[in-house]
Amino acid sequence: MPEQIILNLEEKMTKAIASLRREFSSIRAGRASASVLDRLSVEYYGVPTPINQVAGISVPEPKMLVISPYEKSLLKEIEKAIQASDLGLNPANDGNVIRIVFPALTEERRKELAKQVGKESESAKVAVRNIRRDAMDGVKKLEKSSQITEDDLKSYSDDIQKLTDKYVSEIDKITKEKQDELMSV
């Protein structure tokens, strides 16, 4: 039973890291990446649909995205969605495709993005700590119901803490990489 708690703990912490990586992929670092549009959706026959499901997205140059909608009627919708987003991008619609040129990041914008990375990182750490707390509560309940001994509780608690420390240091490593990427010109 305690082994199952630890397996669940590891699985949940791995998911927290994956979620952090997804969030970081949507924070642009001056280079064009189709993943910056992942959070955006457009109305498609009355249903909010992700842009990458209604259009082809390509990166012909390092600082440019080209969005080719599968239906021309979606051009205006996609353009509006990009302008309304918090990405700070200006789409250029030529009637067939939408081009987005990524401007070079200013020092101020880089610092702003680095702060955002820090906030996302802290949220991931909080999630990992919450997962740890739930696992600790689980093994404490087992000890109270006499399914494991006090020594086992100490051993499992140590294992849970070691896993938590491992995942928190992984979050720190990912965060440092992203912040370095953002701050490099």
Image (spheres, helix red, strand yellow):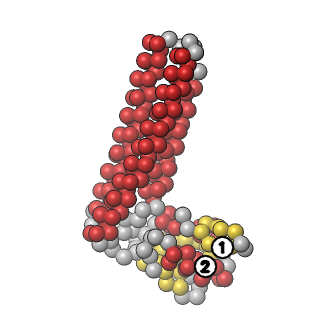
The location of residue 158, given as percent across then percent down, is: 41, 23
The location of residue 95, given as percent across then percent down, is: 58, 88
**Image quadrant containing the N terminus:** top right
- Residues at circles 2 and 1 in contact by the CB criterion of under 8 Å: yes
**Image quadrant containing the C terminus:** bottom left
Label 2 secondary element? helix
Q: Is residue 29 above or below residue 77?
A: above
Image-based side of 119 in relation to 14, left or right: left
Q: Is residue 138 above or below residue 131?
A: above
Three-letter amino acid code at disc 1? Glu
Q: Say few, some or many: other residues with alpha carbon within 10 Å of mark 2 (under 14 / 14 to 19 / 20 or more).
A: some
x 42%, y 78%: residue: 101
| Residue 61 seen in render | no
User: Label 2 vs label 1: CA separation?
Assistant: 7 Å
Farthest front residue? 144
The location of residue 98, given as percent across then percent down, is: 53, 81
The location of residue 159, given as percent across then percent down, is: 43, 24
Q: Which residue is mark 2?
A: 77
Q: Residue 126 got which mark?
A: none
